[in-house]
Amino acid sequence: MATLHPSPFSNPNAQTPFPTFPRTPTLISCKKTNENNGVWEENKVGFVDYNKGKHKVSVEISGLKKEDIPKRYRLRVEGDRGQRDWSISEVVENVYKLRHWEDIEGVLNRWPGRFARKNFPILIREITKGGSVEHSVQVFCWMKNQKNYCARNDIYNMMIRLHARHNRTDQARGLFFEMQEWRCKPDVESYNALINAHGRARQWCWAMNIMDDMLRAAIPPSRSTYNNLIHACGCSGNWTEALKVCKKMTENGVGPDLVTHNIVLSSYKNGGQYSKALSYFELMKGTNVRPDTITLNIVIHCLVKLGDYGKAIAVFNSMREKKSETLPDIVTYTTVVHAHSICGEIDNCKAVFDMMLGEGFKPNVVSYNALMGAYSSHGMHKEALSVFKEIKRIGLRPDIVSYTSLLNAYGRSRQPEKAREIFDMIRRNSLKPNLVSYNALIDAYGSKGLLGEAVEVLREMERDGIRPNIVSICTLLSACGRCHRMVKIDSVLSAAESRGIQLNTIAYNSAIGSYISVGEYDRAIAMYRSMRKKNISPDSVTFNVLISGSCKMVKYGESLQFLEEMTKLKIPMSKEVYSSSICAYSKQGQLGEAESMFAEMKTNGYHLDVVAYTTMVQAYNTAENWEKACALFEDMEINGIQPDSIACSAIMRSFNRGCKPAKVLLLAKMMREKNILFNEATFFEIISACSMLCDWKAATELLETMESSFSVVSIGLLNQLLCFLGKSGKVETMMKVFYKIVESGTDISFGTYSILLKNLLAAGKRSKYIEVLKWMEDAGVQPSVQMYSNISTFEFKGYGGSEYTAFIQERIKRNVPFD
């Protein structure tokens, strides 16, 4: 039955142009009468404000009131003005308004319904729904002091479940023993609630013991009992015990349901057994149990962890089909955002997030954190900050993961000062930095080479009571490598040893890489030998560091020895190892072996990326096989792989050496269209191509791209550009470029002035020649005698005449600067 009531917020004097359609808020109530002759009523009250587009639905329960209690109690409260004939919902509302526990008795003692024993279970049920442990405990204590109170299993079960939800295991266990003291025999729901409490606390052994007690009490376990027990084992990552319980469940004639399958899958996931989880999912398909959204969320998570992103996205797309029975939820979208983040597909992360909004889902903090994490991993601090502000704007409270992601974004973009500001903001917002936050701040300082500040953060972490872990040590070791500080590497290793932190494979890899970066090749090899001696298994990263490091130290033979050792240890090859090995073979002049490695990389199913192609192009360049290098570039285009700056410079070198300078200019045009950054090597090859083609127009266009880079490119490259412009007869353009070089603050060398003077002399620009000589002396660069001799043969009509010529001759003899 539905009835309409005018809202108490309506204005009777309000004038509306259309009286047929009320503009005032409206209350809609729907009454559902339960059993017990209509004593208990659930009254759903909906508040609708058509003007503001707001609505609210709540459920009210009346319970036993004053007229329903025994006459002797009714007479006691009849004349008491302090007594309030509240419904149960009103009692709960008044209790939740209290902030001081001593006031609870005062409120509850004003309620006539306290004399009705049947109100107590409903009151506890409604107050535990709100989730406040303290309010519920205080009401329960008050209830036990009432003379008409009678201990009941359902009341204790509700309280145990509430403590379980808040991970208060000891309190839940205490209630379990208390109910037996009150002569309440625990039933199956009591045991289920207690097993669930221990499961949430990851105390699976306790949960198993409770199950044994349950069997000794001759209480047959239900399906929920087994599910709670499997969940307890799964939360602890003990998936083997979870499977044993599942097997026992089947043997005892209690068949698994969808919840059971999801818990088992979750157990595999928590235990890191992702392949086993997918195998179990395949077995699950053969049963009559259909997977739901939770099942497929676990499957997507496992596929992402195994790196099978294609299948993960395929499962996600199947969930979004119109005929699908398992529609994606917020967890699904968040997992897919994370998957795209790992793949480096930032645009897809934002697209999936926008898709979630378009489907009408309201993202939570975890979803926003996943998007922030994607931006942070690539140092996109502006985008990460925008998401952080959006979290606050919609009324959510950023958690420690949100702050750490933003901190990491500034660290990856080499802005340690900003990262420190975010770190200080964590405490100002009543949050406590965790180990991940400190490690992110250490990395932020280390990325900029501020090793002293990074070490100070480590000390601050220890003062805050947080013990550094192996990630902290690895981060510091990487910072030492960036700072080229060998002494600090030894100090960090000593600090790890003094704190009892055992180095793992990742830490050894960081130490070996840091030693190589500071040029201490022998120390790096000694570190590797120590690693093997301590039975720490190397991985593909270890050998990639050794092989690539040996190549950097021009020890190509040793790099190939490391490759052979890796093969003997049966360590799977990675893309990075393949690329390093191709480089080592090419430097050794073994082009055939390099080609064989490249072909093996293809046949083993590795996705050939721009790094692999660039390495092979450089190998062909080393062997002066320009035709194959050019053909490899065409293969890149066919496979849709976009080259980066390093790849473009290597390919341009092949074009130039292969007498195809026109293709260099076409590639430069493509770089502009696709916004690929130009580096010094690409500028050099483009200038060389322009020189071979005598295309000064293309060189002039290049100037517009190079102008912003004058302060960072080498003076040798700028000299090459000036020389080309001078030889092309574009002396005025040459001088304009020189002025811009001076404005950029680049140190001008003697060779630069020599190029200017040579070209000015060839163009007959005698007055400008003398002016450049004066610039040289003003800049503290002494012109040579030959520079004066070259100009002494010319007559300076209109520029000092014969008197100036005599002065130059005198300068040649004295070889002193101008006044």
Image: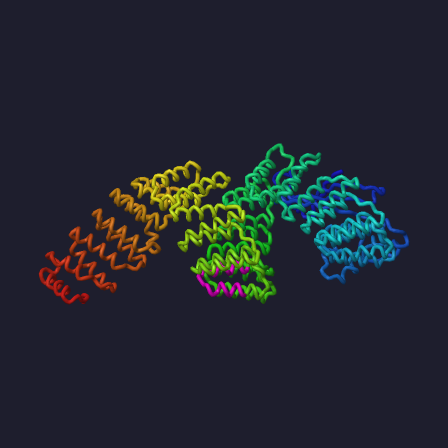
How many marks are shown on the rendered structure? Answer: 0
In percent of width and height, residue 620 lies at 37, 43
Q: Is residue 586 above or below residue 474?
A: above
Q: Quadrant of residue 178?
A: bottom right
Q: Quadrant of residue 282?
A: top right
In percent of width and height, residue 819 lies at 18, 67
Q: Is residue 764 above or below residue 27?
A: below
Q: Nearer the viewer, residue 306 or 618?
A: 618
Would you say residue 23 is visible in this rendering?
A: no
Q: Is residue 364 left or right of residue 748?
A: right
Q: Residue at x 48, y 45 (%)?
A: 575
Q: Residue at x 15, y 57 (%)?
A: 790
Would you say residue 775 is visible in this rendering?
A: yes
Magenta region, main secondary structure = helix
Q: Is residue 634 left or right of residue 236?
A: left
Q: Is residue 521 above or below residue 463?
A: above
Q: Residue furthest top?
A: 323
Range shown magenta: 472-494
In percent of width and height, residue 691 lies at 26, 45
In magenta stretch: residue 550: no
Q: Nearer the viewer, residue 394 or 45?
A: 394
Position of the N terminus, as image quadrant, is: top right
Q: Is residue 74 left or right of residue 640?
A: right
